[in-house]
Amino acid sequence: MIRRLQFLIVAVVLLIAAFSTGLAFLFYVVYLCLLAIGGSYALTRFGLADLEAGYRVDHRQGHVGDELRTMYSISNASRLPKPWLEVYNPTDLPVPLPGRALGLRSWAQRSWVAIVPLTRRGTFRVEPMVVRTGDPFGFFEAAAAVGRPTMVTVFPQVVPLPRWRLPNANLEGTHSAPERTLQTTPLATTVRPYAPGDSFNRIHWRSTARLGEIQVKEFDLEQTADVWLYVDLEATVQRGAGDISTVEESLRVAASIAHDAIVENRAVGLTTSGHRVVSIPADRGPRQRLKIMQLLAAIEGDGTTPLAAVLLNGLPRLRRGMTAVVITPSRERVWVRALSTLRGRGVAAAVVALDAASYESSGRIPPQTEDADTDLATQEQRALRFALAEYDVKAYEVRAHDSLGAVLA
């Protein structure tokens, strides 16, 4: 806009000077300016005519560490070339999609792929594709939007846990649950007559031979395989910033354990104490995995509910044979007492304790000597380990930059 105003002032001054002096040279300059302005306007006016363009995002869901691929295509269906085009997608992704400046001959077509890494979890918006053109002098500009906006959801990073094992719960007898399931589990507890639609691999041949009619097996849920995750997101206990923080580490741990358990056909439940306490009932399968990942992608460490209150409200819902996994950076020992009652109910417990002090000091130059705050944090962390050991609760201590696959083993 400023450039146009400056050019307009110069053109008016030049025009007045040409008519005032009558010099032929000044009239030549005026004619040249009119030709340049007219050509620039025509070039911009028809710069987007007869163009066909589009883009496609290869997937709308991914994990931190994955790559987002966007395919672009643009073609010129006109006899006139398009010497100056700019193509880009506005987006709020942490790493923006790269644009491209190009030219197209008549009847030409261009296609390319833009690849960006997904570096932060959350839900991001990719705006429609913008095709922009203009003139070499910058007098005029034209732009057009193509397509619709696309939402991209980035889940927390899933770390392989090849040696992660759940602690065993105490079960009396062999019957773990009276609840029937359509899924195949190791617990085949009874047989019944065959019904249309039953799978042939469920036929119990010994009972069929003994009774003279086809009998199929019925399965119970294996409660010892059920997992309930408790993620502590109380704001006052969180430390660190960005990817090196207790919030992001807690969500990575929860996502990795949930993914590993669902792949093994376990039922997984989740309770988070973010802005509000949210619980997802225990279930299994890809749909349950999607629910958990969507919740973990959206929540933040801004909760106000202490972990002790979350556990006191949630632990009574656990059935015999389940396993409670608590993920927290809290060094308080009040919530440990809530876990002490689980073993008597046949519910196992495990704690993934994040060393908050290591995340708080990460990225800073370590001091030469430990100060009083560091000593206090070390003592509180040691006292927490002793309290968990007193109640025979399995504990895993995670520090900043640790490998989760090695620690959770």
Image (spheres, grey):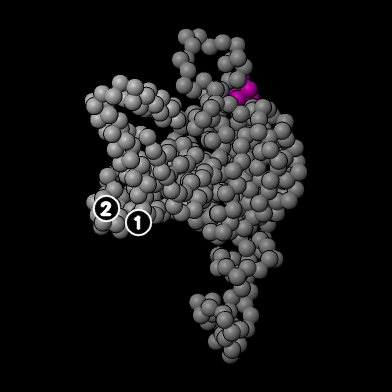
- Seen as rendered, the residue at the extreme bottom is 212
The magenta segment is 379-384
362 is within the stretch colored magenta: no
Q: Is residue 147 above or below residue 240?
A: below
**Count of marks overlaid on the render:** 2
Callout 2 amino acid: Leu
Q: What residue is at 48 percent from the left and 46 percent from the top?
A: 126
Q: Element at badge 1?
A: loop
Left or right of 210? Residue 400 is: left
Number of residues whose C-alpha sits closer than 10 Å to that of mark 2, classed few (under 14), some (14–19) or many (20 or more): some
**Residue underneath mark 1:** 50
Q: Element at badge 2?
A: loop
Q: Earlier in the sequence, mark 2 or mark 1?
A: 1
Query: For residue 73, which quarter of the picture?
Result: bottom left
Number of residues whose C-alpha sits closer than 10 Å to that of mark 1, classed few (under 14), some (14–19) or many (20 or more): some
| Rendered location of residue 210, percent (x, y) | 58, 86
Q: Nearer the viewer, residue 95 or 84?
A: 84
Whether residues under marks 2 and 1 lie with C-beta atoms below 8 angstroms apart, the answer is yes
Q: Is residue 194 above or below residue 392?
A: below
Q: What residue is at 50 percent from the left and 9 percent from the top?
A: 369
**Residue underneath mark 2:** 80
In three-dimensional space, the C-alpha distance between marks 2 and 1, rounded to whole angstroms, equals 9 Å
| Rendered location of residue 300, percent (x, y) | 61, 37
| Rendered location of residue 179, percent (x, y) | 68, 66
| Rendered location of residue 109, percent (x, y) | 27, 55
Callout 1 amino acid: Asp
